Amino acid sequence: KTTDYKRMDMPFEGLGLHPHLVKAIRDLGYTRPTPIQAEAIPAALSGKDLIGGAQTGTGKTAAFLLPVLQRMILSPSKGRTRALALTPTRELAVQVADHLSELAKQTPIRSIAIYGGVPMGPQTKALRSGVDMVIATPGRLLDHLRRGSAKLDQLEVLILDEADRMLDMGFLPDIRTIVKSIPKQRQTMLFSATLPHEIVKLSQEMMRDPIRIKFGGDEKTPV
Ligand code: AMP
């Protein structure tokens, strides 16, 4: 386990992140990657699918956002949605979008949070303006897909955040419908505090040979 320890003790520069991202990380005051970041970032940068066992507070959001941002910085392409994160709640969608704004502030990369309970109009307008990443609750995203206001045919990365909570909230059918409308050729990352059978099954349907990452130090996480 010596190697793991060394990897966890490595500064962000050692993970191969772009200087724009390292600068944003510095400005946020982060000095070292968290254990899940040290494991997940190199795996995600390699383009592989991954399953991460992680609860809130572990730094899991930056663990998936930084590799997405790196991909967008290294091969820029404007006007199309290249990454989608599905979240169980409006609060989490907004939180992830805010985190992206902080990490992407040295770049032109833009995201939008899409969730129910508010009018469709402003979201439709923002989606049509061309955002790089959409962070959405499944039900409202499906409404936008059905109306043609969200276009995901060029998607490169799909993230399921807090997958077990999405299961509890009954979102799995919506998620399966959404996944049918996005390219098969993509990177998929799934984060979940627990891995019930339904989530394992979903991951088998959606992922190819995923790397499994269990964040160190918390025995309570049964992944
Ligand atoms: P999350 O688990 O993604 O919800 O993140 C929990 C909190 O940890 C957030 O407030 C992040 O800003 C913060 N955070 C993420 N990565 C790091 C890091 N490497 N060092 C210090 N704080 C971090």
Image: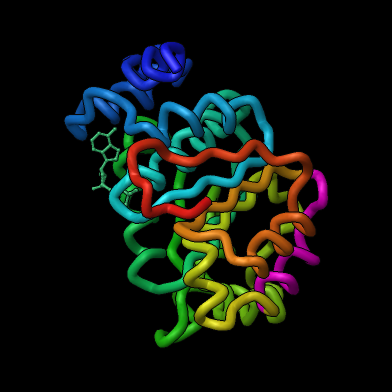
Return the x and y of residue 40 as percentages of the image width and height.
50, 33
Relative to 48, residue 101 above or below: below
Q: Residue drawn 67% across and 59% down?
A: 200
From where the camera sits, is residue 160 visible? yes
Q: Residue drawn 53% across and 72% down?
A: 166
Total numbered labels placed on residues in the image: 0
Task: Give the camera-side residue of 74 and 186.
Answer: 186
Seen in the image, is 11 located left or right of residue 67? Answer: left
Query: Within the image, what quadrant is residue 91 found in?
Result: bottom left
Quadrant in which the N terminus is drawn = top left
Seen in the image, is 8 located left or right of residue 150? Answer: left
Return the x and y of residue 149 as percentages of the image width and height.
64, 72
Q: Quadrant of ligand 1?
A: top left
Seen in the image, is 86 located left or right of residue 217? Answer: right
Task: Give the camera-side residue of 55 and 59.
Answer: 55
From where the camera sits, is residue 108 visible? no
Task: Give the camera-side residue of 129 and 204.
Answer: 204
Query: Within the image, what quadrant is residue 150 found in?
Result: bottom right
Q: Is residue 179 magenta?
A: yes
Relative to 148, residue 185 above or below: above
Magenta residues? 174-185
Q: Residue drawn 33% across and 38% down?
A: 217
Return the x and y of residue 94 as percentages of the image width and height.
35, 63
Q: Is residue 153 magenta?
A: no
Task: Give the camera-side residue of 155 and 91.
Answer: 91
Q: How is the image coloured?
A: rainbow
Return the x and y of residue 151 as percentages of the image width and height.
69, 62
Q: Residue drawn 28% across and 29% down?
A: 25
